[in-house]
Every structure is written in structure tokens, then in C-alpha cells.
Image (tube, grey):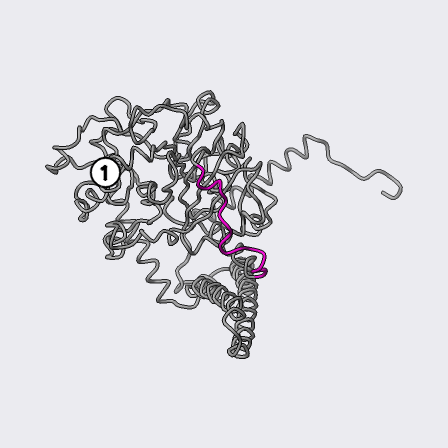
């Protein structure tokens, strides 16, 4: 009615009308879900046998379904095209850079060696980056490589599961042993930053006198995870009463050392703590002649990371030091650890927190007591201790020849009959048997990578908390109630973290 108020049905009528529509919709859905779809052969006959309106409705419905599928394919194709364009640009840029570099090298052949060295170094770095880019891209172009990688993954997972069933537990190496894509991206970005400004990052910085000063507090961290190591250093620095007395010796694989140097050059160690960055190739005594670990790895008899076993060479790596605290890279320091250098180890080599309770986590869980040598030398009921926070008296270590004893056990276990060769803990339990001083449990609270039921009081009272287990704090599967304990030490101003999709 012109100039009048539009008619509006009353609230009860609107409710009844809505209910009627809902019932009709539910009835339609029920009919559609309960009706078996026609086979391909019967599509045409079903259209012809139905009335014209029914045929049109069926055809319209099928057309809409196919349109939705094609729209999804189109969206996926657009994403692939964008990724391919970015990859093509990256390849073209790298190819152009290498061509220009090749021309420069050709024009500098007659220069003296000192003048050629910087150019040679730049060439080596760019070739290394090109190899990484090519390796990253190979899977996308090589179908056979994809099939082989999938086959290898399936086989490896099957082996892990079989081993876990035999041992009665799930191996943490399934998750912890691989490098997540975000961490690999971070290392790549750091390497790119180094290549962009090679003069800004020293290859072999002058050693600081603090690195060999036995009066300071020295830590060893073996890792290829630059983000995790930065959290260990930052948390220890903030917890320390006098950060300038704390020295971190970080040892990584040679391919990751440049990434570590870029990180700590851009984000210097906080509050005056000292950080020495090393690759295991910096230690000439680590060779196949002197180390059965390297011999077995080179012979293909050990599917383990060499970094995991470097802890057994601490006295040789740091000959000037008397005491070192070994920290794993998945820990957070909450209290000043200076007290660890004043603990009396009663002449023992290793100080560690024990993890046995009742009949659980005793030597019988980690060693094969069907072997005569294990039966003769070890008590199956002895309490196992944990890696994560370990205090080592290096003078007592040298006195007792612990590295030599470790070598003996590694040679005995060449065929993996004494302990599971994928785990480094049994080797430590054997090497330091009878030579370990139990520490107060508050020094090292573990389980934040698998146990959701640790009390807040226990965590608050811990000097170090340990995210051992599969649910690492930098992974999406991390336990939410603990993740903030780690992320609050992450330097979120580092721009590469955003670029590499870290969900922090």
C-alpha cells in the first residue's frame, strides 16, 4: 500500500514458516542421501525416463557439481602457477648470477692469488646455494625421485614402527630426527643473506679469550637447529646473575655453520654472554682412523647423526676446560645455572638427573641383557639417568679414559646386538656406569614434549625444562599449555621467521 507500512507476518507465523522450510530441506537431504547414485551406464536412461522438469533438475544438479569440482581445480592450478613463477624467477636469477660470476672468474685468471681468494669464496658460496635450490626443486620435476622418496619414507616408517613394537615404546627419532620444512627454510634464508653481503659475516672470527678460560661457566650444545639454539642461549642469559661469565660452545654440521653465523651476527648474544660457533669438521681428530663412530657411519652401519655422538669427545674438543655442562637444544633455562659449577660430583665424571621410578626406566629397558658382556658388567635394575642437562668433570673423564671405553662399546655394538643403535642414551649409560652422580630433580624437569600432566608447580621450580619427546615447541603438534614457555624467548624481530611460516 502506497504510503502505508509494509505487511510483516507476526513472530509465530515467521517461526512456523522457518520450521516448515527446515523440514522441507531436511526431507530433501534425506532423499538425496538415501537414494543410491545412478551408475554411469544408467545416467542417460534415467534422464530419458523422467519428466522434463525432473530431467532439467538432475542435469542442473550434475552441472553444478562439476562446476564446483572444476573451480577447485582452477584454484589449485592458480596456486601451482604462482609457485612455479616464483621458482622460475629464482632459477633465472641464480643462473644469471652464476653466468656473471663465471665471466668475472675468467677475467681474473691472471690476478695474484690474494686478489682471487674473495672471488673464489663468493663462487663457492653461490654454487652451494645453487645446489640447495636444485636439490629442493628436483623432487618437483623428477617423478621417479618422488616415487623413490615415498618408497623410502614408507620403508623407514615401517622400520621405526617395528623397532618401537620390539622395544615397547615409540622412538622419538621419528619426529625429532627430521628437519621440519620451516627450519630448512630458515637455514636457506640465512644462507641467502650471507651471500647477499659476504663481507658482513666473518668466516673465521678471531677466537675470544673467554672460550678457553676455565674460570668461566662453559656449555656445549650440539645442534643443527639455529632457532632452538638461540632460545637456549637467550633463556640462559636472562636467567643468569652475571651473563658475561657464561660461555656457549655451539657445534653444528659444516653446511649449517654459515646460517648460525648469520643469525648471531644479526642477533648478537644477549646481555654479554659469549657464543663460539664451530663445525665438527673443525676438529681434526674426528676421523675414521680414530673414531669407530665415523667408521660405522661411513660404512653405512649407522643411520644416526654424528652430532648426537660428539658428546663423547668433549675433553678432546675443549682441552683447556675442566668442567662443561651439556645442554640439549630442546631445553629452556629458567634459573641461574652457575651453581652447577660448584656441585661436588664426588669424583664422578657425569652429573645427571635420574628418571627411574619403580621398575621403570632401568638399565634393563635400554640394554640387551641376553648378551653375556651386558650381564657381566651391568645391573639390570640400575637406575637410568637422562640427557638434557649433564655436568661433566673433564679432568675425571680424562683420568678414567671414558672416551676410550665408549670406543670399546661402540666396536662391540657394531652389529647392534648390545643396544638399539638409533639411540645415544644406552651408549652413555654404559660408558658412565658407576661414574654418575645423581642431581636434584629440580635441575632438570623433562617430558614437556609428550606429557600433558606436569604440574605447574614442578615446572615453575625447575632450573631447566626439557621438551623431550615428539611434540617439540617449534612444531605445530606442540602441547599448547607449555608452548609459551619456549616462544617467549624467540627473537620475533628476526624477519626470516615470518617468511618461513613459523606459527609463533
Query: Is 438 situated above or below 137?
Result: above
Q: Position of residue 168 (x, y in %)?
A: 24, 36
In this rendering, position of residue 345 left or right of residue 495: left
Image-quadrant location for residue 380: top left
Say which residue appears at 87% left-offset and 39% top-offset. Answer: 4
Residue 465 lies in what quarter of the image?
A: top left
Q: Secondary structure at mark 1?
A: helix
Judge by depth and name the residue closer to the eye, 412 or 7. Answer: 412
Q: Can you give x and y, in whole percent of width and height, for residue 273 in the image?
A: 53, 37
Segment tinted magenta in the rendering: 196-213
* Up/down of 42 relative to 266, above or below: below
Residue 216 coordinates in the image, percent (x, y):
46, 34
- Viewer can see residue 63: no
The residue lying at 33 percent from left, 41 percent from top is 315
Q: Residue at x 39, y 65 (%)?
A: 41
Q: Is residue 197 magenta?
A: yes
Q: Position of residue 359 (x, y in %)?
A: 23, 24
**Crowding near pointer 1: few (<14 within 10 Å), some, many (20+)?**
few
Q: Is residue 329 left or right of residue 23?
A: left
In the image, is residue 215 above or below residue 124? above
Which residue, as the protein is rendered here, is positioned at the far right?
3
Quarter of the image for the N terminus: give it: top right
Residue 440, visible in the rendered structure: yes
Q: Quadrant of the C terminus?
A: top right
Is 4 left or right of 158, judged from the image as shown?
right
Q: Is residue 259 magenta?
A: no
* 314 and 135: which is toward the camera: 314
Mark 1 — residue?
167
Amino acid at each position: 500500500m502506497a504510503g502505508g507500512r509494509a505487511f510483516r507476518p507476526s513472530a509465530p507465523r515467521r517461526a512456523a514458516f522457518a520450521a516448515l522450510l527446515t523440514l522441507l530441506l531436511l526431507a530433501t537431504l534425506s532423499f538425496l542421501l538415501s537414494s543410491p547414485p545412478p551408475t554411469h551406464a544408467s545416467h542417460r536412461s534415467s534422464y530419458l525416463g523422467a519428466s522434463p522438469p525432473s530431467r532439467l533438475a538432475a542435469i542442473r544438479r550434475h552441472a553444478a557439481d562439476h562446476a564446483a569440482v572444476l573451480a577447485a581445480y582452477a584454484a589449485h592450478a592458480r596456486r601451482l602457477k604462482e609457485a612455479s613463477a616464483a621458482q622460475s624467477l629464482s632459477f633465472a636469477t641464480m643462473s644469471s648470477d652464476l653466468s656473471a660470476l663465471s665471466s668475472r672468474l675468467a677475467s681474473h685468471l691472471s690476478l695474484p692469488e690474494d686478489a682471487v681468494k674473495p672471488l673464489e669464496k663468493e663462487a663457492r658460496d653461490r654454487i652451494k646455494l645453487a645446489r640447495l635450490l636444485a636439490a629442493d626443486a628436483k623432487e618437483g620435476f623428477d617423478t621417479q625421485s618422488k616415487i623413490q622418496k615415498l618408497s623410502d619414507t614408507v620403508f623407514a616408517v615401517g622400520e621405526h614402527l617395528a623397532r618401537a613394537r620390539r622395544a615397547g615404546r615409540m622412538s622419538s627419532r621419528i619426529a625429532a630426527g627430521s628437519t621440519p620444512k620451516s627450519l630448512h627454510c630458515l637455514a636457506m634464508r640465512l644462507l641467502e643473506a650471507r651471500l647477499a653481503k659476504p663481507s658482513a659475516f666473518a668466516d673465521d672470527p678471531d677466537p675470544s679469550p673467554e672460550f678457553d678460560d676455565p674460570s668461566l661457566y662453559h656449555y656445549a650444545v650440539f645442534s643443527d637447529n639455529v632457532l632452538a639454539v638461540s632460545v637456549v642461549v637467550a633463556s640462559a642469559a636472562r636467567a643468569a646473575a652475571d651473563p658475561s661469565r657464561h660461555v656457549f660452545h655451539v657445534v653444528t654440521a659444516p653446511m649449517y655453520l654459515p646460517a648460525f653465523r648469520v643469525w648471531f651476527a644479526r642477533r648478537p648474544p644477549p646481555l654479554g654472554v659469549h657464543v663460539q660457533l664451530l663445525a665438527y669438521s673443525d676438529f681434526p681428530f674426528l676421523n675414521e682412523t680414530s673414531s669407530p663412530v665415523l667408521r660405522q657411519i661411513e660404512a653405512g652401519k649407522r643411520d644416526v647423526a654424528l652430532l648426537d655422538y660428539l658428546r663423547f669427545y668433549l675433553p678432546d674438543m675443549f682441552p683447556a676446560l675442566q668442567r662443561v655442562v651439556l645442554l640439549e637444544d630442546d631445553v629452556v633455562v629458567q634459573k641461574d645455572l652457575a651453581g652447577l659449577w660448584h656441585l661436588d660430583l664426588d669424583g664422578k665424571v657425569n652429573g645427571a638427573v635420574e628418571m627411574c621410578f619403580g621398575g621403570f626406566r632401568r638399565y634393563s629397558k635400554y640394554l640387551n641383557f641376553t648378551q653375556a658382556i651386558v650381564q657381566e658388567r651391568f645391573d639390570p635394575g640400575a637406575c637410568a639417568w637422562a640427557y638434557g642437562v649433564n655436568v661433566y668433570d673433564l679432568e675425571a673423564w680424562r683420568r678414567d679414559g671414558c672416551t676410550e671405553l665408549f670406543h670399546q662399546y661402540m666396536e662391540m655394538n657394531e652389529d647392534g646386538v648390545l643396544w638399539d643403535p638409533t639411540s645415544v642414551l644406552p651408549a652413555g649409560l654404559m660408558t658412565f656406569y658407576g661414574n654418575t652422580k645423581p642431581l636434584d630433580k629440580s635441575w632438570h624437569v623433562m617430558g614437556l614434549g609428550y606429557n600433558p600432566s606436569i604440574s605447574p608447580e614442578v615446572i615453575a621450580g625447575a632450573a631447566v625444562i626439557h621438551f623431550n619427546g615428539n611434540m617439540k615447541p617449534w612444531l605445530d603438534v606442540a602441547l599448547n599449555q607449555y608452548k609459551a614457555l619456549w616462544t617467549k624467548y624467540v627473537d620475533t624481530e628476526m624477519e626470516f621467521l615470518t617468511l618461513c611460516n613459523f606459527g609463533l
